[in-house]
Amino acid sequence: MYSTDDQRKLYDLSKKLLYTPQADLFGEGVAERAEDLRRVIRYHDWRYYVQNDPVVSDFEYDQLYKQLQAIEEQFPALVTPDSPTQRVGKDLVESFGQVAHLIPMLSLDNSYNAGDLDDFDEQVKKLCKLDKDTDVEYCVEPKYDGGTIALVYDNDRFLRAATRGDGYMGDDITLNIKTLKSVPLQASFSKHGIARAELRGEALIRKDIFEKINKKRQDAGEALFANPRNAATGGLRMKDPREAAERGLEAFLYQLGYAVDKEGDDILKRFTTHDQSIHLLRELGFKVPLHQPEPGNHLEETKTCRNIAEVIAFCNAWQEYRDEYPYEIDGMVIKVNSLEYQERCGYTSHHPRWAIAFKFKARQATTRLRDVEFQVGKTGAITPVAKLEPVPLAGVTVQNVSLHNEEFIRSKDIRIGDQVLVERAGDVIPYIVKSLAELRTGSERVIHYPKHCPVCHSELVKPEDEAIWRCENSDCEAQVLARMIFHTSKHAMDIEGLGESTIEKFYKLGWLHSIADLYRLDYEKIAQLEGFGEKSAANLRNAVEKAKRNPIHRLLHSLSIHHLGRKGSTLLAAEIGHVLDLKDWDLEKYQTIKDVGPVLAQNVFNFFQNPHNIELLETMERLGVNLHQTDEDKKAGVNTEGPLYGKSILFTGTLSQMTREEAEKRAAAAGASIASGVSKHLSILVVGEKAGSKLKKAQELGTVEIWSEQEFLQKIEQ
């Protein structure tokens, strides 16, 4: 339908239109601008609904749509019969038969903040001719991120299923929907006087099942799905129902859109609220959003709110909680509960006036990859970092994204100059989902991995069992600086006041050459520096002196020995009286410690056989840094007589009486080993507030003991 050249031009036009200043929106050339918006929106509809492969984020699409809406409202003469605002976008696929919906399936208007919801509430009251102080009751439910479906039942039997299509007709996906066990093939509608009904819902893939599907595809050498939504919508259109069944699809039903009796009279008039119809669907055996939270879920899936203030609070709570929910959602849907009020509000050609979607902060956006920098880490690992054209995403501006390693770049065919789709996983870590190869102009450049360290120019090596290229020159300036920064960090020696910028400043002044120099700083000179002063220098001295007394498991972790994390450091510290005892250990002795494998053993052995490292530790000890085992180190060792000896334990949710780190220390002191995840080998799961998917998985296994925080404390005190 669209050539590569057409797609590139339309994409470029989209980006240009996105950044049109509000003041220029209605200015000169407004008719041409309206037509350009219609063209790009049709293109993005095709990419999203037909190809299931969008090239802009939902937020960017919404902004283009709102611009067109604003122009057409300001200049009604510019509205055309085929404008996207006059009809819902299509997702019809010619290889499927099409069926007509019993009533139109319209889109929803969108909101992005509390102010938008207040405006919506005000509009509802005006349309219903209510006093502004009157509370309107709303139903709020998750906005599932999957494939929209319509199910028709006739005389209690499942008749057919269709996609949303253009809102009036959709693809016939009956055979595929029959494979969904969450969709009953028979339901007792007739007990409620209903002869024919059409239900609206969403087909989804649970997050953990999606991960298994992608793992299976990876093992088979197949392309991975970008997200659960793409996997779900693709599953609905599989030509072989058996393949659709393998996707693990589920269906959530959220509306009884049409219901008539044998005479064709509207049964919905017998209901007074939307809430009642959802309860009926649940009673009939359909999967619907629940008013009570399921085990492991912190929030109920749907809530009937007394007013818009309750709606806003519930939406904000879900925005914080959504990562714990087992399904992908991109917002919440707010519906006027009263069916009488819904009728008073009515519809536009595009959406019902009695419902609105509250969209969560954008988690995806498109931008251009300007360049790639290769950074050197504390263990010599070379990490490629993408330098992006700054793009706002989930409340921050993203311009640097890790590309991980050479294989990651090759597998995704990422090139300098590419337009890329960026996501913030869990609203925290930026991640490049894919490059948009169809938008290339020919000026893009393949990313070549360096053969030499970008800082010290030593030749890079790539161990056979690793995906990372490394600089093996331990005196490399970048590694020295990175090791000092890590040494002072929270989970290492935890020296408050010696952050990254301060260490870089001292390093440039020539005061720091190794981590030993951190313990012989000239505080009089520091007091003279701009931005410090005598009080800051004194505070820094106190923090350094405090760090000198740290237990040795912190010191071991702070040395940046490859693969030696906090757990391994604690295990080693429990076995030695003095850090330099390790220089006399052989490889076999390391491997007698439970959970210390051959790779870690070799790395620690190599470190303590290096005379330079021994000299460094001896210097630190002369400067007052503790190298002797402390009581905390002893307690952190495995207690074979403890009440939890032989048990593996995991903590989930928010603990009220201690931090997660403190809980793990106390569990280890009681003889338990700390597990990394829920599996059949896990003995105990300790559950705090807001426990999520780990609790549900443990309950499904049925072999894991589930304790409250209080039960855990009682057990270890025995």
Image: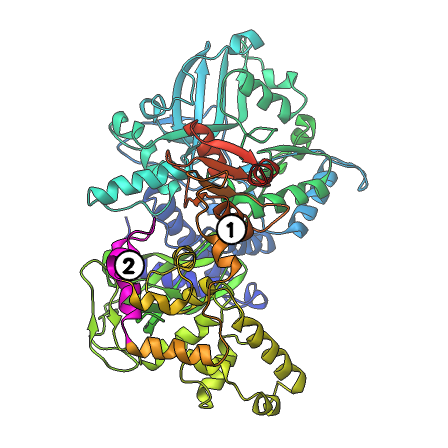
Q: Which secondary structure is most common in the magenta stretch? A: helix
Name the amino acid type tagged 2: Ala
Q: CA distance from mark 2 to mark 1?
A: 23 Å
Q: Earlier in the sequence, mark 2 or mark 1?
A: 2
The one of 157 and 169 positioned closer to us in this rendering? 157
- Residue range in magenta is 586-610
41 relative to 706 in the view: left or right: left
In this view, 281 is above or below 210:
above
Query: Is residue 338 located in the magenta-colored stretch of the structure?
Result: no
Which residue position is annotated with label 2? 601
Q: Under tag 1, what secondary structure? A: helix
The one of 139 and 96 positioned closer to us in this rendering? 139
| Observer able to see residue 328 | no
Label disc, if present, on residue 71 of the rendered structure: none
Q: Under tag 2, what secondary structure? A: helix
Label disc, if present, on residue 665 of the rendered structure: 1
Q: Are marks 2 and 1 in contact (CB under 8 Å)?
A: no
The one of 25 and 300 positioned closer to us in this rendering? 300
Q: Residue at x 42, y 44 (%)?
A: 675
In this view, 635 is above or below 250:
below
In this view, 345 is above or below 83:
above
Q: Position of residue 592 (x, y in %)?
A: 30, 51
